[in-house]
Image: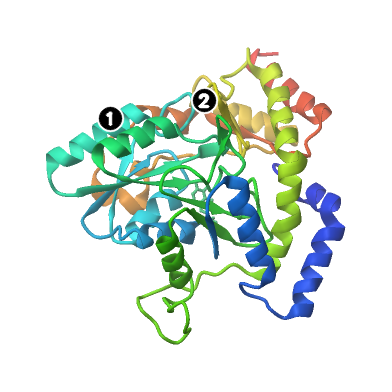
Amino acid sequence: MQFRDLKKQYEALKPEIDAGIQDVINSTSFILGKPVTELENQLAEYVGRKHCIGVGNGTDALVLSLRANNVGAGDAVFVADFTYIASASCVSLVGATPVFVDIDLKTFNISPEALEKAIERTIGEGKLTPKAIIAVDLFGLPADMPAIEAIAKKYGLLVVEDAAQGFGGMINGKRACSFGDISATSFFPAKPLGCYGDGGAIFTDDDEIDQRLRSLRAGGKSPTDKYDNREVGYNSRLDSIQAAILLPKFKALADYELTDVNQVAAWYTERLKNVAVTPYIPEGFYSSWAQYTIRLKNKEERDALQSELKAAGIPSMIYYPRGMHQQQVFKDMNLSEELYPNAVEATKTVLSLPMHPYLDEETVDKICAVITDFVKGK
Ligand SMILES: *Cc1c(COP(=O)(O)O)cnc(C)c1O
């Protein structure tokens, strides 16, 4: 059994993917070629933003989003404590300081109450200038954007949506990658929309930011002259082959994968709702299910269940085993556990189950039977 079955998806889309790759080879336009422009146009239209800029990976998408908005030394950037490392390391990479914020245990996303407290605390300390919020759409569920955008407005902060796991999600029909001032996503193979290597994209409605990003991703070049360089830039461009792979995969996602993966989530929840804490999707929210993550009573039960699943040939993952405040790389910040009770609880009790649009009901039955028998002590 696969945790995320990319082979089944390839079998379904093989003719289109193979032809797309061959076309790129024939064109010899390997970087930022025609498929990249086509993908940028299709994705911008789908999410409802004016511009989409293809880049090398999701981490760079976040770094460039901050750079293009002049976030840097002396700035505080607020980010959830419970997330993948890139949500936080992007802040350090531009010279700013991440301020970690506890999560809402029900959604696993940043807690708006804890966010406001962290902003007030930072203002009170007077050392850093509150500048931006990175709102992560964890596990495919959009962050509480209405609440976050209201707080950002109150304190005059920039909102960067980290939609690396969020592509395809929605709040009241408005799509992920269209929230806040700027949005970043990742096409890492296991994400809701993944390619066959590294890739990423940035979404913005601002023409000037769009121009600056197109410069930054290509060495800081001027729009008209590649060898006239205006600022220190990056080499972070999307490959044409990756875009050619993404085009049919995006069509499948929009046509049926999102519906199918939501069906899989419903099968899981139906079977597990009285066995463990199943994912909570707030009213009006729609998840693209980058992960299906349950919570167990405590760490002992979680770890023992993972062993039990493994013995039954069922893969599962702990996303994430530690909060940002517990990461080696941030240990000099001397952050107190007490600020992150929910994130700490999540690290001890979460377990992500096999999840992808090609999972069938029989397999979900088998997985849920193992979990149910274990928890009920049979
Ligand atoms: C995967 C991920 C990233 C980084 O994406 P890469 O393409 O792997 O660099 C950033 N944020 C979150 C929440 C992610 O899950």
In the rendered structure, which amino acid carries the disc numbered 1? Glu
- Which quarter of the figure has residue 277? top right
Residue 344 image position (x, y, % from top left): 39, 31
Q: Neighbour class for label 1 at 10 Å: few (<14), some, many (≥20)?
A: few
Q: At which x and y percent is residue 241? A: 70, 68
* Res. 319 visible in picture: no
> In the picture provided, is 313 more to the left or to the right than 223?
right
Q: Please, what secondary structure does the residue beneath circle 1 have?
A: helix
The kind of residue on which mark 2 rests is: Glu
Quarter of the picture containing the N terminus is top right
In percent of the image, x 31 and y 50: which residue is there? 330
Toward the bottom, the furthest residue is 227
Mark 2 residue element: helix
Disc number lying in front (2 or 1):
1
Which residue position holds label 1? 338
Reply above or below: 278 against 115: above
Query: Which residue is rendered at x = 85% and y = 49% of the image?
Result: 12
Q: Are marks 2 and 1 in contact (CB under 8 Å)?
A: no
Give the labeled residue for mark 2: 300
How many tags in the picture?
2
Using the image as rendered, state which of residue 364 and residue 252 is in the foreground: 252
Image quadrant where one finds the C terminus: top right
Q: Determine whether, in the image, residue 367 is placed left or right of residue 13.
A: left
Which label's residue is closer to the chain start, 2 or 1?
2
Residue shown at the point (61%, 50%) measured from the top left: 45
Image coords of residue 72 (percent x, y):
27, 60
